[in-house]
Image (cartoon, grey):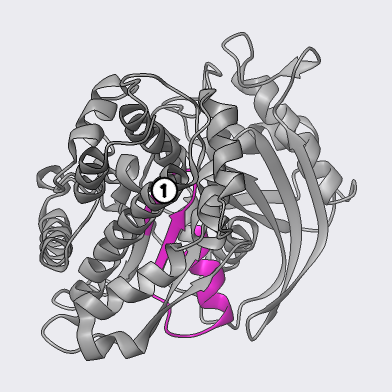
Amino acid sequence: MAFNKEQFANLIEEFTVKTEQLREIAADFRYDLRLGLKDPDQSSLRMLKSYVGLPTGKETGEYLALDFGGTNLRVLRIKLLGEGKFEVLKKVAKPLKVEGVYDFIGADSTAEEMFDFIAELVDEAVEGDHTTKYLLGHTFSFPSEQTDLYNAKLIIWTKEFATPGVEGKVVNDLLKEALHRQGIDNVEPTAVINDTVAVLLAAAYKQPDIYIGSIYATGHNTCYLEPYADSADAPMILNLESGGFMKLVPSRLDIEFDKASEKPGEQRLEKMVSGRYMGELFGMALAELLDEKGKNYGFTSIDMSNIILDESADKAEVVKIVAAKTGKTIETADAEMVRDLASALVVRSARLVTASFVGIIWQLAGEGKAPKQHIAVDGSVYEKMPLAKENIMRALSELLGEEASVVDTVLENGGSGLGAAIAAAMSQK
């Protein structure tokens, strides 16, 4: 069977965001930002305060960094040397769950067990030294309610975590108690930040003119330094939880996908742009072309990446991937369309993410011109997905015109650890 060309053209059209629409999305994002600054309840952006500004780049000393973003835990001992330089002196990494051996994230574990396990890793990172004083910064990537740099209360576990006794508690308190139980009173947790904030801190430590930090990977989120130009408040990094931005026009397939998702009606931007969902949307569209509407093939963003990278005349790799996932053998002409379909989804993703960046750039510019800046981005989609980077740059040009010449993006891929150490250093101010 050959694909229906008209059906294919309609699918591409559904996933295309024209310049005018893009401009509207950026303007709506800025509007939601401004609304959220006055009253977060009125905005689809959460505007969470981080209680930290930007580093000067002159922070120095030895700090501990705990990177707690998922099942794989990392504790690093980092020496900040100032002038944007640093050295990782020790790194300890262990999963919180090993099938059949231990499980600290299941409903049968306890908060005490989980944090005792973390304290043991900290002990390894300081190599059993219980006298030298260390401040510890903590990148904690779960929804938290924060009242200052130290106090972050877990609102709700996500990412399949179910450990009882942590929700509603200040995570640094639980960590402090566990360290005390193990006689590690020389380590003092002082700062908790979100992973997006960590990306911004790490990048801003290394070079000037960085005000926006973003994660563009399995999930998606952005933070920025709000200058509070019209008020007496000190500039502070705000975590937008921008994956929840709602003022978008989803395609027919986005709506179908959302209805069947774990949390319908939530995380609209994230569901349209992030690596976790892109493969599924691509599979839904391909199922229609293969006359198997509603079938789930389990495509991933890595499959999409490999499909886009196949520039051969016979598209052998595309044919192979489609056969492996769907059990169908397609012609070269159809393989071309499959590649175009994957490309269209990636291009749309990059354009929508850029519109959110531009909304922030307009907010930072106020009534003036866009300030010179590098947007710090971490994540597999940004780093590895073909077409992502160049379409971010293209969309910046479309929306900012001549001012796009002062804006670019930089990869910051060690942010979670370094950012936590910098937050610990800044907690002394």
State the residue at coordinates (83%, 57%): 90
Image check: 88 left or right of 106? Answer: right
Residue 50 belongs to magenta span:
no
Q: Is residue 127 above or below residue 254?
A: below
State the residue at coordinates (76%, 50%): 186
Q: Which residue is mark 1?
A: 342
Q: Nearer the viewer, residue 86 or 53?
A: 86
Q: Nearer the viewer, residue 218 or 241?
A: 218
Please state, as top left, top right, bottom left or bottom right, where the N terminus lies in the image.
Answer: top left
Image check: 169 left or right of 420? Answer: left
Residue at far right of view: 128
Q: Is residue 257 above or below residue 16?
A: above
- Residue 412 percent location from the top left of the image: 56, 67
- Residue 80 percent location from the top left of the image: 70, 73
Q: Over which residues does the magenta segment extend?
A: 198-222
- Quadrant of the rendered structure where residue 70 is? top right
Q: Amino acid at mark 1?
A: Ala
Q: Is residue 193 visible?
A: no
